[in-house]
Image (cartoon, rainbow, N blue to C red):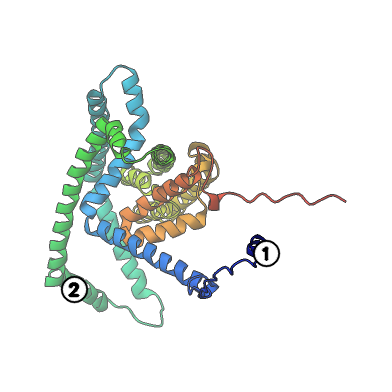
Amino acid sequence: MGFFRRHNQPPAPVPVTLTDPPRPSFWADSFGKLATRSLQVIIVIALTAGVIIAMRVLNVVVIPVILALIFASAFAPVMRWLRARGFSSLWATIIAMLGSVVVLGGVVWLIVWQVRTQWPMLAEKAAAGWALLVDWATHLELPFVIDQDQIDQWLSQVGDFLTSAQFGSGALAGVGAVASFFTGLVLLIVVLFYFLRDGRAIWEFLLRPFRGTHEQRARRVGTKTVETLGSYVRGTAAVAAVDAIGIGICLFILQVPLALPLAVLVFLLAFIPLVGATVAGILAALVALVANGPFIALVVVAVVIGVNQIEGNFLQPVLMGRSLKLHSLVILIALAVGTLLGGVLGAVLAVPIAAVAWGIIQVWDGPNTPAVWARKHVTAPAPQE
């Protein structure tokens, strides 16, 4: 009986531990997620602003390094060709840099020679054009009267400003800017030399912290950056050369003074998309107006417009490729931001940097696989009834 009594007893109750219900998290609801995302955006903006401020403070170092990277990317095919012909990295670098110095020196000498020979004639014609403009303004029937005394007063004010302390302080600032320019130029040449000679070793050193997929992504990003910068510079230089040659031949035929310096200016300003060609055309037309009259100036304007149309519709798609072609809105925004942050040099560097950023996005997840958020959405076909 004791056995049955023991085994028929009800089981002992299991102790129950009372726990508090989970508290609602302030970061789990929609408002909390919005606050978290806003905080992340603020941190990213603060870091970006800090980097930009540091770059502006150290612009004498940062800008030469960026320019050296761009020039080294443009010289990459030349360096490969020289190395394939048996030249060492040192001799290939020396040949590439000496060739660039010879070409640039020849162009500068031609510009100085033409300016020295044609400047007196242009100054004489500019003085005659100014006198004609003054005579036209004094005899024109306007709501307000412009007489010779007012013109002399304006010229006197300009002379007073040029001899004032304000202009002198600006001149001193200009001297400081010239000193910074030559300092940056020397640094640019030195950094470019090392990039051309030891570029591979420098890149392998920078890749040491990365492993696995991160190393593969870093290699893709580096290769895409060099390819994009090199293609952009070489393509833009080819398009600018065609523009400069076409407009320069027109100026020579029309016997416009300073044709060679204006052609070189067209070449340089062509590196500023959308805006540079317009500015170069205006300057060429003004010189033609002063030296040759309104009819020749109109012909120059027509030639500049025609060359720009040929460039935009035929040369850029062929020489630069569609992979480097950015939307006009992107170019305008990049130019505005670059000009705001770095002036004229910022406007020149803004578009290639934007092209590099877009190129990196295109290879972020693979050689031909863009980042997830930049991929095209493929919509499923509608079911057929």
Query: Do the residues bearing badges 2 and 1 touch, measured as CB atoms within 8 Å?
Result: no
Return the residue nearer the eye: 33 or 118.
Answer: 33
What percent of the width, then of the height, locates residue 173? Answer: 15, 62
In which quadrant will I find the N terminus?
A: bottom right
| Quarter occupied by residue 220 | top left
Q: Name the residue under label 1.
A: 8
Q: Is residue 148 left or right of residue 318?
A: left
Q: Residue placed at 61% from the left, 49% from the top?
A: 376
In the image, which is nearer the foreground, mark 2 or mark 1?
Answer: 1
What percent of the width, then of the height, locates residue 107? Answer: 27, 37
Q: Using the image, determine if residue 360 lies above or below residue 47.
A: above
Kindly give the residue lying farthest to the front in the view shown.
1
Q: What residue type is labelled 1?
A: Asn
Q: Using the image, determine if residue 61 lies above or below residue 91.
A: below
Using a 10 Å C-alpha cutoff, classify the residue at mark 2 as few (fewer than 14 neighbours), some (14 to 19) or many (20 or more): few
Residue 379 appears in the picture as rendered: yes
Residue 311 appears in the picture as rendered: no
Q: Name the residue under label 2.
A: 156
Could you say whether the residue bearing mark 1 is in a helix, strand or loop?
A: loop
Q: What residue type is labelled 2?
A: Ser
Return the residue nearer the eye: 109 or 285.
Answer: 109
| Quarter occupied by residue 7 | bottom right
